[in-house]
Image: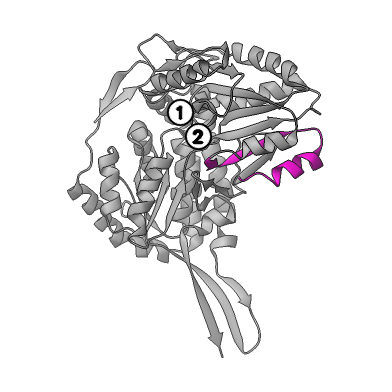
């Protein structure tokens, strides 16, 4: 399998892909090691995962350089991702004993009662390319902490990073018969679905997630799906610092080239502040530097998938054909790599694909609304339900709006943010199940109830 640099489309290297035979060998190896791993004290597993975090920090520049080379994100954003993964590991390891240890419900009387959180067994993790350290950490770290063995399939677009993850886990003390990676494209992912694993956790698109769920449901095995989004943001008319809000919300839309499941993908602005917001937003986007991801100061770099610029161009053309106005960008950047201009469209409607279908790129549609009620109706007019943001000076007003939004995460005066302390979960086509927080730690366990009578 060729590994390409999306900024140049040159071949970085070639990797041998897994086969049915090698996948089965790895699963058998994990079966041999999982019970011994689960039998180790939780404190030992915690210490090993903390060593993994330290190893990533000590090798930050090397890990970030590989990540940038194979997915095309700016080098500083790659550093930010590795550091962000370490922060999540810190929270997960710090709180693992509290949420994975035995939980006494009744400690006195004739019958004592407790819950024990046992591991699932072997967890299959089919991961994503856009934030391989972060979305991987969401799954394999709590899975390992809980005593599971993990068969980790990185995206074929982030395979080199997957190899780095495995290398650092082994160096930290995770046994080879507890963590294995499967290298390859969707055909290798299919082998994982056919295998007899004890839990499946996928991060990626809705169509693929739906297919995975259909296959796994036949086995009656746990399945967690972190899927895409068409995340809305609303700017109310009580905002006073328009320039700062425009800068922050533009960053929410364009960071990582808009290739985040929780990127802002559609914006609604109250008519009383619309013109001022549009002027400030356009100025902010026009200030972004586009170029090679290793160049200093570059904010918009290469799109990871080669086909994505053509897809984005089609969304833009659809919007223009239906009456939208192009404020900036809108075109493929002619180069050897996968580049698209940061793009802002106004006079958009929900008849346009750019306001209804996931874009996953540096494009945004901004729509004027007359009041909060209209904004709420439009924000909820989506098949997705991952995140939604409200910018307002009034927390009570923001809360009234948030309470009516059908999304797994809501923000007030922030956006495009994930916290290890809070559950990360989607609704509707954005998936189901949760990672992160105490909910995410326990997602990789099967609770057992104990009734103990003296």
Residue 102 percent across, percent down from the top left: 55, 70
Q: Quadrant of the C terminus?
A: bottom right
Residue toward you, 360 or 54:
360
**Residue receiving disc 1:** 64
Vertical placement of residue 281 versus 16, above or below: above
Vertical placement of residue 415 versus 341, above or below: below
Residue at screen point 32% across, 18% down: 9
Give neighbour class at mark 1: few <14, some 14-19, many 20+ (Cα, 10 Å). Answer: many
Discs 1, 2 touching: Cβ within 8 Å:
yes
Q: Quadrant of the N terminus?
A: top left
Label whose residue precedes the other's in the sequence (1 or 2): 1
Residue 398 painted magenta: yes
* Residue 82: numbered disc: 2
Vertical placement of residue 396 versus 101, above or below: above
Q: Is residue 203 visible?
A: yes
Residue at screen point 56% across, 56% down: 439
Q: Which residues are magenta?
A: 383-406
Q: Is residue 217 left or right of residue 83?
A: left
Residue 444 percent across, percent down from the top left: 46, 58
Residue toward you, 252 or 91:
252
Residue 359 percent across, percent down from the top left: 48, 28
Q: Is residue 2 left or right of residue 368?
A: left
- Disc 1/disc 2 C-alpha distance (Å): 7 Å
Numbered label tally: 2
Q: Is residue 204 visible?
A: no
Q: Is residue 35 left or right of residue 115?
A: left
Residue at screen point 40% across, 8% down: 334
Q: Quadrant of residue 281?
A: top right
Furthest residue in direction left, as rendered: 21
Residue at screen point 38% across, 34% down: 161
């Amino acid at each position: 399998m060729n590994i390409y640099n999306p900024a140049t489309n040159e071949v970085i290297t070639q990797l041998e892909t897994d086969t049915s035979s090698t996948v089965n060998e790895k699963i058998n190896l994990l079966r041999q090691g999982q019970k011994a791993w689960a039998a180790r004290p939780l404190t030992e597993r915690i210490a090993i995962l903390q060593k993994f975090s330290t190893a990533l920090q000590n090798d930050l520049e090397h890990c970030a350089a590989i990540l940038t080379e194979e997915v095309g994100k700016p080098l500083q954003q790659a550093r930010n991702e590795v550091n962000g993964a370490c922060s999540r590991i810190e929270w997960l390891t710090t709180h693992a004993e509290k949420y994975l240890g035995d939980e006494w419900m009744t400690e006195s009387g004739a019958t004592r009662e407790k819950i024990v959180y046992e591991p699932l067994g072997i967890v299959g993790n089919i991961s994503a390319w856009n934030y391989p350290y972060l979305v991987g950490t969401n799954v394999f770290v709590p899975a390992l902490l809980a005593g599971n063995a993990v068969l980790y399939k990185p995206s074929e677009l982030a395979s080199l990073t997957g190899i780095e993850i495995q290398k650092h886990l082994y160096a930290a003390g995770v046994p080879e018969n507890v963590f294995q990676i499967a290298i390859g494209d969707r055909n290798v992912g299919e082998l994982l679905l056919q295998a007899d694993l004890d839990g499946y956790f996928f991060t990626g698109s809705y169509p693929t997630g739906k297919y995975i769920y259909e296959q796994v449901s036949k086995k009656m095995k746990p399945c967690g799906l972190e899927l895409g989004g068409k995340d809305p943001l609303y700017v109310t008319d009580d905002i006073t610092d328009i320039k700062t809000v425009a800068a922050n919300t533009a960053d929410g839309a364009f960071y990582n080239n808009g290739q985040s499941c929780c990127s802002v993908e559609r914006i609604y602005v109250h008519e009383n502040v619309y013109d001022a917001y549009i002027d400030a937003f356009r100025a902010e986007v026009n200030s972004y530097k586009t170029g090679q991801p290793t160049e200093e100061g570059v904010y918009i770099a290469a799109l990871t998938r080669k086909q994505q610029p053509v897809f984005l161009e089609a969304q833009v053309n659809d919007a223009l054909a239906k009456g939208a106005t192009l404020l900036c960008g809108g075109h493929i950047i002619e180069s050897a790599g996968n580049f698209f201009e940061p793009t802002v469209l106004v006079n958009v409607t929900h008849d346009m694909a750019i306001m209804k279908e996931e874009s996953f790129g540096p494009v945004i549609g901004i729509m004027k609304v007359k009041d909060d009620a209209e904004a709420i109706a439009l924000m909820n007019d989506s098949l997705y339900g991952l995140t939604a943001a409200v910018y307002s000076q009034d927390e009570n007003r923001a809360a009234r709006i948030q309470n009516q939004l059908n999304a797994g995460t809501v923000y007030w005066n922030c956006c495009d943010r994930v916290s290890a302390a809070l559950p990360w979960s989607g609704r509707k086509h954005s998936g189901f199940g949760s990672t992160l927080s105490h909910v995410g730690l326990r997602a990789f366990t099967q609770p057992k109830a104990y009734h103990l009578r003296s």
